[in-house]
Image (tube, grey):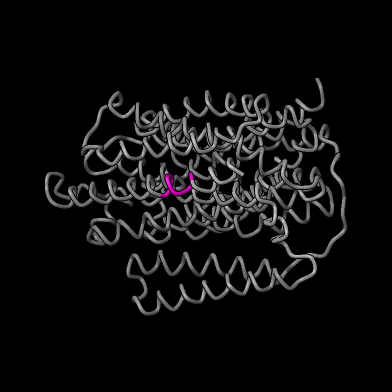
Amino acid sequence: MNYKWIALSNTTIGTLMASLDRNIIIIALPSIASELHTSLITLVWIAIGYWVVTASVLLTFGRLADMFGRVKLYNLGFALFTIGSTLCSISQTGEQLIVFRVIQALGAAFLFSNSAAILTDVFPENERGRALGLNQLSIVVGSVIGLALGGFLTSYLGWRSIFWINIPIGLFATAWSYAKLRELGTIKKEKIDWLGNATLSGGLVFLLIGITFGSFQIIDVFFSLFIIMGGTALLTLFYIVEKKVPQPMFDLSLFKINLFTSSNLAIFLNALARGAFTLVMVFYLQGPSMGLDPFHAGIYLIPVSIALSIFAPVSGWLHDKLKLQIFTPIGLIVSAVGFLMLTGIGETTSFYESVLPLVLVGAGMGIFASPNRATIMSSVPSYRRGVAAGISTTLVMTGSAFSIGLVFLVFSQTMPLDAAQSVFTGSFNALDNTGMEVNKFMISIHFIFFISAIIMVISVIPSITRWIT
């Protein structure tokens, strides 16, 4: 087999596994809450902690990849991810599950920060968009397939089974990557920017703690604002540090490249708009009005996956052939239309009624993702691709984490706290399914999808600017 296809196959498995586990746990949260007797805030951080940790370390891992070799650290990521999955499957408390998800997230960060760079090293420019499109497809499809697969496994084998499937695949892929992948990138010795990593990680964690703990009234509003201001101050300090240190982890000089800057701004806004999409849909489908079991809730989301599977590789192939930047704004507009249609979703909906908006959301993601990712990776020098991949994926993870935080903030402001807790822990039988609580639940969902549509439209601006210039 040609080496480039070996590299594509292995990195696609890696990103598929890592992305699948970002969302596969969401559909199992009610079962986890029931068995482990977790609090609502523990459930929130079981879901959101994976994103935060991955976003916090991606840049440093990208730097390490440029220093020590992308393949070596990619192999390490597979091993860590497999170990973390094993530990998650034997968790006895919610807090243990959060810690073991951190180990998973560290492995995922190695996979995410190196897969795109490995492919960019291997594939020539005229094939790069298609290769990155297939890899990007595995990231987003994995996130959606995780819901259907997670629903099936949770319904019939229990929530621990969602981690069992990673173990044999992880063991095989770790051995395969170690035996077959070889280093083709340029090794460049640099120093690690520990202060930059600490200020970025601290800033993200403080902001999300302030938002989530404040939303559920675990801390009062003044303390919540104090923590949020502390997080903002740390992120400001992070920017200052990155301007001063000789070898920053967040290479601000790359943002002097117009294509790199506009593409990353678009990808961040896109993640902010859609990052919590699957979470909202899962709790709508399993919530007080629809009341589906995990398996059938996952089935409803299959159209998103199918649309992604079709449009992501096609848009990547067309980008390679035509070199047009118009695909990215088209994809964002298509997704925005899908979100606008979802603002009219009723308390109950049939599978066929939901197909069109879900297909539009998925198709738009696919059309946007491949050309945008190829543009980012091709816009920087080859020896900076590890850092470039880390920056773009960090922005995706950060946008997605804040998207989830925004969702819980909206729910907490539009619903009584006890009603929100009933929905998210699966104990909503106590709610009056025909009363005001369901009405407020639907108002929250409609408002969230409206915000997503607006952010999608805003993200078109940097895409069009890039296209024109």
Extent of the magenta region: 455-460
- Residue 121 in view here: yes
Residue 262 placement, left or right of 155 = right
Q: Specify the quadrant of the image occupied by residue 78.
A: top right
Q: Is residue 93 visible?
A: no
Q: At 40% across and 47% down in the image, what residue appears? A: 29
Q: Nearer the viewer, residue 229 or 334?
A: 334
Residue 287 image point, x, y percent: 27, 43
121, 285: nearer the viewer: 121
Foreground residue among 46 and 168:
46
Q: Residue at x 75, y 47 (%)?
A: 380
The dominant secondary structure in magenta is: helix
Q: The N terminus lies in which quarter of the figure?
A: top right
Q: Position of residue 413 (x, y in %)?
A: 27, 62
Furthest toward the top, the residue is 1
Q: Position of residue 414 (x, y in %)?
A: 24, 58
Tell whether 178 sits left or right of 199: right
Q: Inspect the magenta stretch and tell me whether residue 7 lies in it.
A: no
In terms of image quadrants, where is residue 246? Answer: bottom right
Quadrant of the drawing holding the C terminus:
top right
| Residue drawn at the location 54% of the way across and 43% of the way down | 463
| 204 to 388, vertically: above or below | below
Give the vertical position of 60 relative to 365 (above or below). below
Image label count: 0
The image shows residue 381, relative to residue 307, as above or below, that is below
Name the residue furthest front.
468
Residue 192 rendering spot, x and y as whole percentages? 78, 65
In the image, is residue 359 above or below residue 216?
A: above
